[in-house]
Amino acid sequence: MRLFSVYFLLFFLLFSLNGYSQDTIVKQEPDTITHWKKKNMLGIDISEIAFMNWNAGGTSSITGLLKGHIKRDYDNTNTVWKSELIFKYGMNLQEGNGLRKTDDVFRINSTYGHRTDTTSNWYHSAKFNFNTQFTAGYSYPNTDKAISKPFAPAYTFLGIGSEYINKIDKYTVYLSPLTFKSTLVLDQTLANLGAFGVTKAVYDTEGNMISEGKKSKTELGILVSGTYDVEVYTNITLHNKLSLYTDYINNFGNIDVDWQFKLDFLVNEYVKANIGLDLIYDDDIDTIKEIDGVLTNVGPKVQLKQMLGIGLVYNF
């Protein structure tokens, strides 16, 4: 009966919005007086699979993802300022496994640029990024020992450089010879393990701790990043972002990679589907795994996250 109710609700929702399915969303034009353009978006993605007397077998589950995107853009001929707050939090409830976290993002980005020549697309720029999470993460099925927590880690990037902004083709290229990177691990247990690149604790031959692990790490290096946004087809938009960073002092030339790729499919004003891929590699970040009940540092690994969702969005 519960399964029937869920599908009836989805069936009713899709058909009630069907009258809008052929509409192309009109984008909000920037305010010509204040030069500000804003975006406020809240959304939820839900997926479910349920089995009853299914001979092939399977496990019933339901997944929900709450997401938000708040953005403010200022554009006044020679000056641009773009700031955004992005958050996501996803949970999965699977039969026999209980509730588990699937996604956890809290990110702030801000870029300021100024040019002296209106015919040039190059801007003197400053960029700020902050990234952490809401709740502890675990190596399931073990939920006794967290492998990450709020502000463990937390990353901050702050730099100056030049940015090429093509407003017509909607792509940017940012070059910074001076970017400060800070890594915080404010949980002492994780810091002692040397998680996320901080200096780990020192022990004597008998296993007694001589000094605790450090809770922070600072770096100074080069940052190269770029973005590309394009409507590849009617109501299908591609978002592509790539960041490359190398530290001057610690293994110069060893590049940290952060690549975000997403396709948005706009069904109507309230229903949107998306496909996404996040890839991260940082040689300073050691992966923490549980081996025989003990949290163990297993070295740097490529981090990969793939997303596919459909849900409701509300813009205000």
Image: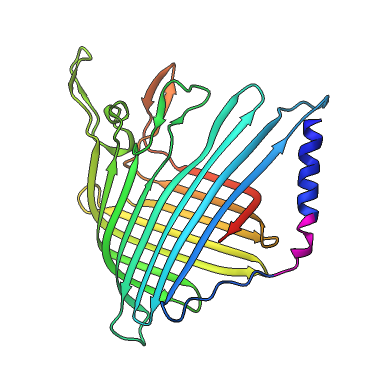
- Which of the 4 image quadrants contains residue 49? top right
Q: Is residue 115 visible?
A: yes
Give the quarter of the figure containing the N terminus.
top right
Front position in the image: 286 or 310:
310
Name the side, left or right, on which 40 lies relative to 162: right
Query: Which residue sits at x=49%, y=73%?
Result: 170
Give the percent coordinates (x, y) of residue 178: 23, 61
Give the percent coordinates (x, y) of residue 163: 34, 71
Front position in the image: 211 or 126:
126
Front position in the image: 257 or 238:
238
Name the side, left or right, on which 60 lies relative to 184: right
Query: Which residue sits at x=52%, y=67%?
Result: 229
How is the protein colored in the picture? Answer: rainbow
- Which of the 4 image quadrants contains residue 133? top left
Query: Which residue sits at x=53%, y=62%?
Result: 239
- When the figure is inspected, residue 157 is found, relative to residue 166, above or below; the finding is above
- When the figure is inspected, residue 162 is found, relative to residue 106, above or below; the finding is below
Give the quarter of the figure containing the C terminus.
bottom right
Which segment is the magenta one?
16-23
Name the side, left or right, on which 187 lies relative to 301: left
